[in-house]
Amino acid sequence: SLNSHPTGNHFLQIPGPSPVPDRLLRAMSLPTIDHRGPEFAQLGRRVIEGMQRIFGTAQPVVIYPASGTGAWEAALCNTLSPGDKVLMYETGHFASLWHRMATRLGLDAELIAAPRADEWLPQAGHWRHGVDADFIEARLREDTQGRICAVCVVHNETSTGVTSDIRAVRAAIDAARHPALLIVDTISGLASADYRHDEWGVDVTVSGSQKGLMLPPGISFNALSQRALEASRAARLPRAYWDWEEIVAMNSTGYWPSTPNTNLLYALAEAIEMLEAEGLDHVFARHQRWAAGVRAAVTAWGLPIQCADARCHSPVLTGVITPAGVDADALRRVIHARFDLSLGTGLGKLKGRMFRMGHLGNINDLTLIAMVAGVEMGLRIQGVPLAGSGVEAAMQVFRETH
Ligand code: PLP
């Protein structure tokens, strides 16, 4: 094939890791410095204060040299004790994995979801919707003894492209007058989708570097609240590396107890500067507009968008359900081989039934038109009947809105 030696740039359109701006790659290539030396403290303080602004918090932010999974574990083991009851909401594959982790850690973790009948995905109708805050409220009201210690939800469910209303979850906990902590995963939402840790009353927010922050994988975060810090003093799950106390204490001087990821912190400082120079509200609006263009393309093809609720379409990624008999992974393979374009696979219950298009990281309107064109060509190669041209539809959105 004449495409067997790809030229130009690869189209990394998975929903994270996202394409990294050259400015961040250059920042990472600077010499590694002494993490206990005098220059380092300035960098350390700069990234912690910057991340407080990105999370929307005046409380401590802990930075781990770990992927998001590490920060998930940190959030649980710092706040909870063996056998504690936690309520987790099944929005998709990542919520399910977090639940599996909670169970492995020895928590009594209950995974709930409001049932949803669905003609396209009868096995996973609830994976097409966001967190139902009323459902959580009803469950908390049943817990008259206050045994549930934490409510855990995924803000931007990366396996489906559904963004849940965290404010509504906080309101549900408050309406039930329940003392549970609110722990939120916004690993793929932060710095792409609107997020406000303090204002929304979140106790622990978990995030990662490789999505909206546009860094490579390798660092992750816990944003804390005073209640979370209090809970951590009584929490008895075993923890050592993840322990907040020592890290937060040393961070006040700009240092870490163990070796931080120096070169990724250079990139993080640059990313924060880029995001703030643009303004976070502008960043959020930009992703909403991109998402609208990509959804217009899917609608023009006549294919169902994974997220069935227009109130929670993700600004970060769009999941597309393939017609019965069309293997979404075979489609992805063809698109990769022919057009050097990577798309996200269907995870867990969605394997083979859907693919995911990312609209995050170092991209622009034309990157997305190219992505849509690559998918459209792939769908035609695989013989999928299309109602119309997604490329035309996306171009119209990008032409008419700016
Ligand atoms: N939670 C969400 C919502 C994610 O998207 C991911 C990764 O894609 C994770 C958790 C796990 O993070 P990691 O793969 O960085 O360990």
Image: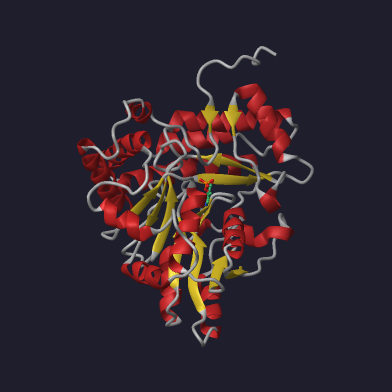
Q: Vertically, is 199 above or below 288?
A: below
Between residue 106 and residue 307, name the one nearer to us: 106
Residue shown at 30% from the left, 35% from the top: 270
Residue 164 in sight: yes
Res 216 → quadrant: top left
Between residue 239 and residue 118, name the one nearer to us: 239
Residue shown at 43% from the left, 51% from the top: 207
**Residue 95, image x, y percentages:** 57, 58
Q: Vertically, is 176 above or below 382?
A: below
Q: Is residue 264 left or right of residue 116?
A: left
Q: Vertically, is 245 above or below 372?
A: below
Res 173 → quadrant: bottom left
Q: Quadrant of the N terminus?
A: top right
Q: Residue furthest top?
A: 2
Q: Quadrant of the C terminus?
A: top left
Between residue 370 and residue 146, name the one nearer to us: 146
Q: Residue furthest bottom?
A: 144
**Residue 322, image x, y percentages:** 70, 44
Residue shown at 45% from the left, 42% from the top: 211
**Residue 400, image x, y percentages:** 41, 37
**Residue 148, image x, y percentages:** 51, 77
Res 218 → quadrant: top left
Residue shown at 69% from the left, 59% from the top: 124
Q: Is residue 255 left or right of residue 177?
A: left
Residue 155 in sight: no
Colouring method of the image:
secondary structure
